[in-house]
Amino acid sequence: MINHEVRTRRSAEDFPIEEHLAYKIAQVAVDPVEAPPETAEMIVNRIIDNAAVSAASVARRPVTSARRQAQCRPLTGGSTVFGVDGEYAPEWAAWANGVAVRELDFHDTFLAAEYSHPGDNIPPLVAVAQRTGASGDDLIRGLATAYEIQIDLVRGMCLHEHKIDHVAHLGPSVAAGIGTMLGLDVDTVYQAVGQALHLTTATRQSRKGLISSWKAYAPAHAGKIAVEAVDRAMRGEGAPAPIWEGEDGVIAWLLGGPDARYTVPLPGPGEAKRAICDSYTKEHSAEYQSQAPIDLARRMRGRIGDLDQIASIVLHTSHHTHHVIGTGSNDPQKFDPTASRETLDHSVMYIFAVALQDGEWDHERSYAPERAARADTVELWKKISTVEDPEWTRRYHSTDPNEKAFGARAVVTLKSGEVIEDELAVADAHPLGARPFARTQYLDKFARMADGVVDPAEQARFTAAATGLQSLAADALGGLNVRVLDDVLASAPATGAGIL
């Protein structure tokens, strides 16, 4: 890996295009290196994972709205939309499928200086691959680039510190991944990366206070914008430049300012793209930093016994967990039993309480309004708080994968004065956890989420297509779509008619 220093440059400064971060990303994208076997295997796992969570979310209102928007854009020779037949405009297929993937907060994650869900790259790349007749191998190489670029940006540039939403790293990664997949030249990819970044920077209010369905739409929007950016760049249209380093660019006005310095690692020429193997998926449908606390709560409930005897619970955790999903956020909505699912998903206090009481976490039952409103849950919920522990913050930002941690230490004080403590550094499903996810677990997750949603024969057809991805020929990627049972689609809620 080569570390690249990135900083603001004055307009009058000599700053050749080859030094622009967007150009360096484009050079990585056009490097004709093959994806190593472990990267290709993990890409297949994550395609299966995305299909699993899409099956679980397909009848929910936000997913239904996005799907119906896409269905207003039919296109012969276009792309598929999860759950239904037909061909549609690729940018709108990317939109609909991106919302389906993201709705339940149930797919993969990578956390470093910034945080991300790099599986958000998959819907737009699959949509473009289907439209352009790319092969399975082309798609794998494109996704290897997309994961690499997003994860490398996440390693080097913190967005949330400046209240910019994390999908600002997703637009450039999708554009770069499409560039690899389609074999575009470096100048075209450079322009597409710049356009995609310029159009996907937004504040992170989407993840603050009363969180709405836009949390699911934000990455889908970034993917759609990136598809459109590549389309324009292929037609010869340019982008603001230098987009990160310019005097009025992203760093100067949206991030650390004119004096800020960032170090972004990128693969060198001929270096394989392996970043996807550093990411991890979710066993539980909740914000990633609550994965280990859920497993910790399940482990502790037997030691605690009668939960009514709890006086208080303090979760000692990282700065990020404390301030984003903990009491350090100062969001009263995180204690509101009538809050939206998206808000409860970002309340580790609620999540820890329910996991303690139920000994499990379910993507539907754990968020049901009647579940959140249970009097004993509300009582326990309000006894839970978080504090930042510098050691957990240090481990969160560690570059050593054996030390990096996203967990917490729980200090449970009973009314008797007895204190029960335990801690868990990583979730059970993490590569270093008690039960790491491998191909079997991904397939089991798909089967569990697709049960009663997708016909068993269709499940088998899809898993065969996904596991054989590398050998799929051009024009065969439509097989990555999954047809959902008619009665499941019919159960989707009514939505407004919209404009179209």
Image (cartoon, rainbow, N blue to C red):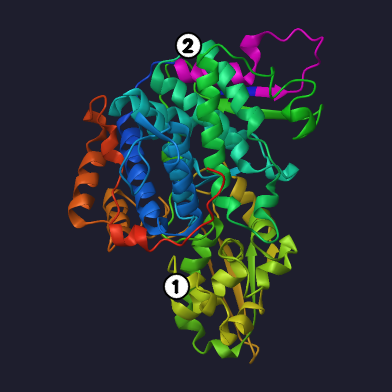
Tell me where residue 171 sits by quadrant. Answer: top right
Residue at point 67% right, 60% down? 322
| Residue projecting furthest to the bottom | 416
Residue 7 colored magenta? yes
Q: Which residue is mark 2?
A: 185
Residue 100 at x, y = what percent?
44, 50
The amino acid at mark 2 is Asp
Query: Which numbered circle lies on residue 321?
Result: none
Q: Which residue is mark 1?
A: 365
Residue 476 at x, y = what percent?
24, 30
Answer few, some or many: residues within 10 Å of disc 2's Cα (few below 14, many 20 plus, some between 14 and 19).
some
Residue 265 at x, y = what percent?
57, 27
The amino acid at mark 1 is Arg
> Which mark is first along the chain, 1 or 2?
2
Magenta span covers which residues? 5-30
Vertical order, 126 against 430 (above or below): above
Residue 39 colored magenta? no
Of residues 235 and 480, the one nearer the viewer is 235
Of residues 192 and 393, the one nearer the viewer is 192
Q: Taking 312 as reference, is 479 left or right?
A: left
Confirm or deny contact between disc 2 and disc 1 (CB under 8 A): no
Residue at point 54% right, 53% down? 405
Whether residue 98 can be seen here: no
